[in-house]
Image (cartoon, rainbow, N blue to C red):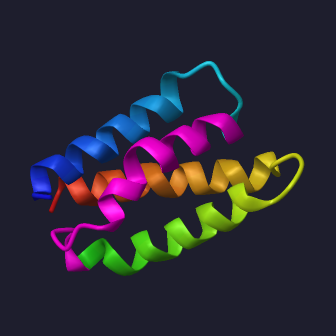
Amino acid sequence: MDLTTIKRHFLSAVCVLGTAEDTIAERLRAVYRDHLKQVAASSSLPDSVRGDYDKMMSDLSELLSRQGDVDSRRAAVVAKRIVSLYDRVIKA
């Protein structure tokens, strides 16, 4: 996957976070499933964000794997991290 496609996945993720009418947990599930997992397999992710991306994906996976309700505060923190990484990726 090239950098342009990675940027498109991040843009789509941010759009889902900001415009979907679902709960924050459902928006994060969609972002993880439909956009960010595809980026994980890419070696074209800039080195400057790779570590933060891997940590964020680990935290997101752990958050979404819990049974029951997702902690909305933790979900909001992860959503902000996605937006921050999007900003860094588009500047790469």
- Quarter of the picture containing the C terminus is bottom left
Establish if 28 lies above or below 45.
Answer: above
Vertical arrangement, residue 34 with respect to residue 21, above or below: below
Instruction: Give the answer, above or below, for where 54 lies relative to 3.
Output: below
Residue 77, image x, y percentages:
64, 55
Furthest-top residue in view?
21
Task: In this rendered view, identify the residue nearer to me: 90 or 5.
Answer: 5
| Residue 11 percent coordinates (x, y) | 30, 39
Q: Name the residue located 47 percent from the left edge and 31 percent from the top edge.
A: 16
State the predominant SS element of the stretch in magenta. helix
Specify start and end residues of the magenta stretch as a single range.
Answer: 25-47
- Quarter of the image with the N terminus is bottom left
Instruction: Specify whether 18 is left or right of 38.
Output: right
What's the residue at 15%, 69% (across, down)? 44
Viewer-nearest residue: 42 or 7: 42
- Asked if the magenta segment contains residue 75, the reply would be no
Residue 46 sits in quarter = bottom left
Which residue: 44% across, 75% down? 54
On the image, the x and y values in percent for residue 22 come to 66, 24
